[in-house]
Image (cartoon, rainbow, N blue to C red):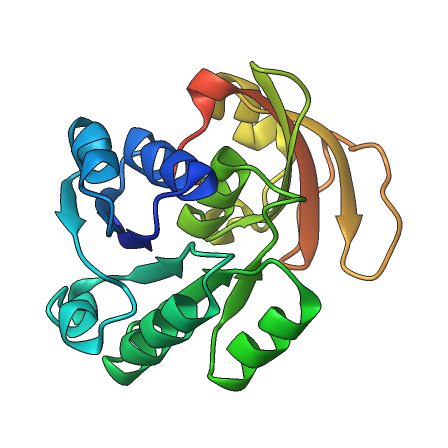
Amino acid sequence: MKKSVAVLGLGKYGRSLAENLYRMGADVLAVDKDENVVNEIASKCTAAICANLENEDEVMALELNNMDIVVAAMGSNLAASIMCVAVAKDQKVPVVVAKSSNDRMSSLLKKIGVDKILDPEGEGGLRSASILLSSSFRDFFELDSNMYMIEMDIKKEWVGKSLRELDLRKNYSLNVVAVKEKGHHWEFVDPNKRFSETCILLIVAEKKDLKIGL
């Protein structure tokens, strides 16, 4: 099932996040006060709206309660970030995340209930999009423009099965590099050992093979 995501604030990071979310199959609402920016991204998302994100009435009018995830991507605008997070939390959005530019801003956003802080210096739009849309991804590393390394929780349907049985390379185009139990060290994978529900996998995949369902 597609996830619906609102990206509020379309600076360089917000645009990258919105475009990657849309490319990966999400329904994306992109919002910014700059009409030119909104027009530029309109063809790269589900819907694009021009709105002043510091204005409560305009943020309320976005009907964020229909979203699975709301991202306040205005790292340099604390007032707009607080307004968007507050409205989203009030409208019972399941997951509310925000970009932050410093520790003080992160602290304030956490106090008003943000579920996750995005670190634009440590993660790009593609990495953020992948983590937000996946129920399994724990971390995401770009090896180059085509290849990615992903740390992910074991999927429920994989528990009790071995790597040989699952044949992840054939069925998902994934290559398992290492495995570990939570709280333990990484080790090479025994292809015949059955995965437990506490397993974490380290996998490598090409960009074209990344799927939201993982």
Query: Residue 46 or 11: which is nearer the viewer?
Result: 11
Residue at coordinates 31% horizontally, 29% vertically from top-left? 23
User: Taking 62 as reference, is 208 above or below it?
Assistant: above
Residue at coordinates 79% horizontally, 48% vertically from top-left? 180
Query: Residue 139 or 166: which is nearer the viewer?
Result: 139
Q: Quadrant of the C terminus?
A: top left
User: Taking 49 as reference, is 12 above or below it?
Assistant: above
Query: Residue 70 or 194: which is nearer the viewer?
Result: 70
Pinpoint residue 19: horizontal percent, then vertical percent.
33, 33
Pinpoint residue 72: horizontal percent, then vertical percent.
39, 60
Residue at coordinates 54% horizontally, 38% vertically from top-left? 127
Q: Which of the 4 image quadrants contains residue 186? A: top right
Q: Is residue 32 left or right of residue 151?
A: left
Pinpoint residue 82: horizontal percent, then vertical percent.
41, 75
Q: Is residue 42 visible?
A: yes
Residue at coordinates 28% horizontally, 84% vertically from top-left? 90
Q: Is residue 69 left or right of residue 207?
A: left
> Exactly how many numbered labels are in the figure?
0
Q: Which of the 4 image quadrants contains residue 68? A: bottom left
Q: Is residue 126 left or right of residue 30?
A: right
Q: Is residue 76 left or right of residue 25?
A: right
Pinpoint residue 151: horizontal percent, then vertical percent.
66, 42
Query: Residue 98 or 145: which is nearer the viewer?
Result: 98
Q: Is residue 45 visible?
A: no
